Image (cartoon, helix red, strand yellow):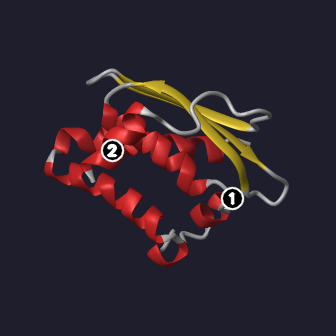
C-alpha cells in the first residue's frame, strides 16, 4: 500500500484545472500547510464528467486527492451524497479497491487522517455549490 501512496504522491493524476469546470472549492490545513483546490465538472445529469485538483502538501494529501479524482469520475456523486448511498466495494474494480484501501493505513497516525480526508471534504463542498 505504501507504494501506491508514494506513486500517487510523486505522480499525482488529474493535477491542474480541468477544462470547463462548473464547481470548485478550496481547503487549507494550517497545522501542516496542506492545500487543495478541487475543480469539478458536472454534466446535466449531475454525473462527474471531469475532476481535477491543484495543491501542495505531504505525500498522503496529494495521493488522496489524486485517488479521489480517479475514483469519482463518471459517478453520480451528487446523488450518492443526497441519498446517503455509498460507493460500495462491488461498484469498484479490484485495482480501485486496492488503491482506496491504501489510504486506510493513516488510521494508525491520527495526525495524518486530516491529510487523507481533506480532498474528499473539499469535493463535498464543491458539489454543494450551485
Q: Position of residue 25 (x, y in %)?
A: 59, 33
Q: Earlier in the sequence, mark 1 or mark 2?
A: 2
Q: Quadrant of the C terminus?
A: top right
Q: What label does residue 74 carry, if any?
A: 1
Element type where label 2 sits in the image:
helix
Q: Position of residue 62 (x, y in %)?
A: 41, 34
Q: Residues within 10 Å of mark 1 (few under 14, many from 20)?
A: some
Can you tell which quarter of the image residue 126 is in?
top right
Residue ID at (37%, 63%) = 98
> Residue 30 occupies which quadrant of the picture?
top left
17 sits to left or right of 12: right
- Residue lying at 42% horizontally and 66% vertically, measured from the top left: 97
**Across the whole image, how many numbered discs are drawn on residues?**
2
Residue located beneath label 2 in the image: 5
29 left or right of 22? Answer: left
Work out which residue is located at the far right of the displayed protein and give it: 44
Would you call the spot at circle 2 few (<14 residues within 10 Å), some (14-19), or many (20 or more)?
many
Q: Nearer the viewer, residue 36 or 130?
A: 36
Q: Position of residue 38 (x, y in %)?
A: 58, 35
Relative to residue 10, is residue 104 depicted above or below? below
**What's the CA distance linking mark 1 and mark 2?**
23 Å
Name the residue rendered at 31%, 55% in the picture: 102
Single out the residue that lies furthest toward the bottom.
Answer: 90
User: Can you tell which of label 1 and label 2 is closer to the viewer?
Assistant: 2
Residue at 18% of width from left, 45% of height from top?
110
Return the residue found at the far left.
108
Amino acid at each position: 500500500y505504501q507504494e501506491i501512496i508514494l506513486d500517487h504522491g510523486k505522480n499525482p493524476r488529474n493535477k491542474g484545472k480541468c477544462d470547463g469546470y462548473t464547481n470548485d472549492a478550496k481547503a487549507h490545513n494550517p497545522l501542516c500547510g496542506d492545500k487543495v483546490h478541487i475543480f469539478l465538472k458536472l454534466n446535466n445529469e449531475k454525473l462527474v464528467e471531469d475532476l481535477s485538483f491543484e495543491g501542495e502538501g505531504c505525500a498522503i494529501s496529494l495521493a488522496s486527492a489524486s485517488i479521489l479524482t480517479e475514483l469519482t469520475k463518471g459517478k453520480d456523486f451528487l446523488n450518492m451524497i443526497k441519498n446517503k448511498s455509498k460507493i460500495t466495494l462491488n461498484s469498484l474494480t479490484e485495482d480501485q479497491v486496492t488503491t482506496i484501501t491504501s489510504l486506510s493505513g493513516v488510521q494508525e497516525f491520527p495526525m495524518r487522517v486530516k491529510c487523507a480526508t481533506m480532498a474528499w471534504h473539499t469535493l463535498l463542498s464543491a458539489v454543494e455549490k450551485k
